[in-house]
């Protein structure tokens, strides 16, 4: 039977594919950041620190943090948690561990600084694609964003300030645990937000031209 006869099934399959691709790109970005060893985005700094201080895999650290935020999101702001939120939380950790051997074998730490910077920019691009895909085709926001939106509505803490505070906690905690903070961290601060906005605008124009829903 053709899937066009089952629009609900087609929609679910498309949404699942988007989540898997987005999560795989996020997992790839985490591995690229860590293996370049010149600093990462704030959350990856924390994952790196937990990996080094506790001796657990980066994927396991990511999985545990994701589940904690997912539980908090379900408790505080359940309406903002959807299919994408749950799937991302459960998939990102295992995908980080699955991709890691392939990236580790590339021995990125031996490359020149310039090449590492290019790779880190690519990692940021992967993160931006992840955010754009989930925001436009997913169902449900990131669990941590659901928590921050709850704090905004309940206590009047603006989301932007809450996000800055969360990033500060991730960065400082990760650094104390032994995570690498460096030029890659600066690049992540500078490029991830603008890159996400730019890709979002490009996708919006593409959807208007080809009338995608």
Image: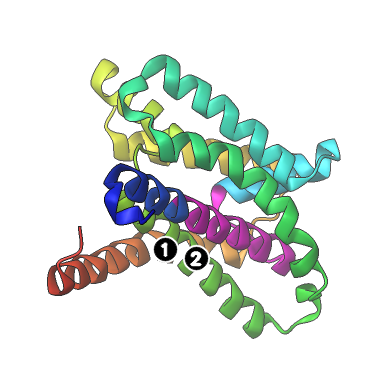
Q: Where is residue 126 in the image (x, y as percent from the top left)?
A: 49, 65
Q: Is residue 74 above or below residue 110?
A: above
Residue at 17 percent across and 73 percent down: it is 210
Q: In this view, does 207 lie above or below 54?
A: below
Left or right, 17 with respect to 38, comes to left
Q: Which of 34 and 177 is in front in this view?
A: 34
Residue at 46 percent across and 69 percent down: it is 125
Marks 1 and 2, Cα distance to the nearest angstrom? 5 Å
**Which residue occupies the extreme right position in the image?**
55
Left or right, 188 with respect to 110, comes to left
> Which part of the image, by quadrant, shows the C terminus?
bottom left
Q: Nearer the viewer, residue 22 or 117?
A: 22
Q: Position of residue 164 (x, y in %)?
A: 41, 41
Residue 96 within the segment the image draws in magenta: no
Tell me the residue that label 2 is attached to: 126
The image shows a total of numbered marks equal to: 2
Q: What stretch is highlighted in magenta?
A: 19-42
Locate residue 123: give its quadrant: bottom right
């Amino acid at each position: 039977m053709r899937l066009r006869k089952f629009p609900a099934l087609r929609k679910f399959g498309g949404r699942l594919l988007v989540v898997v691709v987005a999560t795989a790109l996020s997992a790839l970005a985490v591995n690229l950041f860590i293996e370049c060893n010149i600093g990462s985005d704030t959350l990856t700094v924390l994952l790196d620190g937990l990996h080094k201080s506790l001796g657990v895999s980066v994927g396991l650290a990511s999985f545990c943090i994701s589940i904690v935020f997912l539980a908090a999101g379900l408790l505080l702001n359940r309406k903002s948690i959807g299919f994408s939120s749950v799937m991302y939380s459960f998939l990102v950790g295992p995908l980080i561990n699955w991709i890691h051997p392939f990236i580790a074998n590339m021995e990125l730490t031996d490359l020149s600084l310039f090449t590492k910077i290019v790779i880190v920019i690519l990692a940021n691009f992967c993160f931006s694609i992840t955010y754009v895909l989930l925001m436009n085709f997913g169902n449900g926001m990131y669990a941590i964003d659901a928590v921050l939106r709850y704090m905004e509505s309940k206590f009047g803490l603006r989301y932007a300030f809450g996000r800055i505070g969360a990033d500060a906690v991730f960065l400082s905690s990760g650094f104390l645990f032994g995570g690498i903070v460096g030029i890659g961290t600066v690049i992540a601060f500078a490029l991830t937000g603008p890159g996400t906005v730019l890709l979002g605008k490009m996708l919006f124009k593409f959807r208007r031209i080809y009338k995608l829903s």
